[in-house]
């Protein structure tokens, strides 16, 4: 997948992105919402191997003016359903509308293959929930105290789903 809109680009991650992904994945501030406030403690080599082994290369890099600012991914959960994830990892690029634009681009492309797209987010991540709901995602359920983060703290999650009929593109 290779998508562009003005100065934003979404492209498949390659082995050459492993160093950047390693920096982001090992940063506890970036990974806190996913339950890893201490980061993943991984290596660029391990990430490169993960990229090599991904047959559909479902991991993508989000760039602004050719500079990596985040990542997006998807995985098929059923033949016509996929689950997505998105992170704007460069904090200086957050709250600028890039996530909503990139997510809109990504969703439009995925609806060429899938009838439903699902995701979950931390209940405390209200900013993300606002964006998801603006794009048409519907809250399916809240899972209170459903998992523990890396430090043993209970976390709650919100499950969302979106069909193409409900999708409200931002572009």
Image: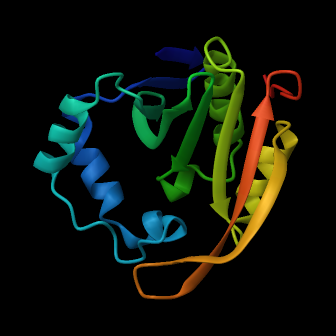
Q: Residue at x 30, y 66 (%)?
A: 40
The quarter of the image holding the C terminus is: top right
Q: Position of residue 137 (x, y in %)?
A: 81, 41
Q: Residue at x 71, y 42 (%)?
A: 97
The colour style of the image is rainbow
Given the current orientation, which residue lies at the most extreme front position? 78
Task: Identify the image quadrant of residue 83.
Answer: top right
Q: Residue at x 21, y 31 (%)?
A: 53
Task: Identify the image quadrant of residue 81.
Answer: top right
Q: Residue at x 41, y 29 (%)?
A: 58
* Vertical relation: 32 (above or below) 128: below
State left or right for residue 131 relative to residue 6: right
Q: Position of residue 129 (x, y in %)?
A: 77, 56
* Vertical relation: 36 (above or below) 163: below
Number of residue marks: 0
* Vertical relation: 106 (above or below) 89: above
State left or right for residue 118 relative to residue 60: right
- Work out whether residue 133 or residue 61 is closer to the camera in this orientation and state it: 133
Given the current orientation, which residue lies at the most extreme bottom position? 152
* Vertical relation: 5 (above or below) 130: above
Given the current orientation, which residue lies at the most extreme top position? 112
Q: Position of residue 145 (x, y in %)?
A: 65, 80
- Work out whether residue 152 or residue 40 is closer to the camera in this orientation and state it: 152
State left or right for residue 48 relative to residue 169: left
Q: Position of residue 41 (x, y in %)?
A: 23, 68
């Amino acid at each position: 997948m290779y998508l562009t809109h003005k100065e934003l680009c979404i492209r498949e991650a390659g082995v050459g992105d492993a160093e950047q992904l390693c920096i982001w994945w090992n940063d506890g501030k970036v990974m806190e919402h996913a339950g890893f406030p201490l980061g993943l403690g991984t290596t660029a080599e391990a990430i490169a191997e993960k990229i090599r082994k991904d047959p559909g290369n479902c991991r993508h890099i989000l760039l602004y003016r050719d500079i990596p600012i985040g990542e997006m991914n998807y995985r098929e959960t059923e033949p016509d359903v996929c689950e997505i994830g998105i992170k704007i990892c460069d904090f200086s690029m957050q709250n600028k509308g890039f996530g909503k634009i990139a997510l809109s681009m990504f969703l439009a492309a995925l609806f060429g293959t899938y009838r439903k797209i699902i995701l979950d987010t931390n209940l405390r991540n209200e900013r993300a929930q606002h964006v998801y709901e603006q794009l048409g995602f519907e809250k399916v359920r809240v899972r209170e105290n459903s998992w523990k983060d890396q430090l043993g703290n209970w976390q709650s999650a919100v499950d969302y789903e979106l069909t193409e009929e409900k999708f409200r593109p931002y572009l």
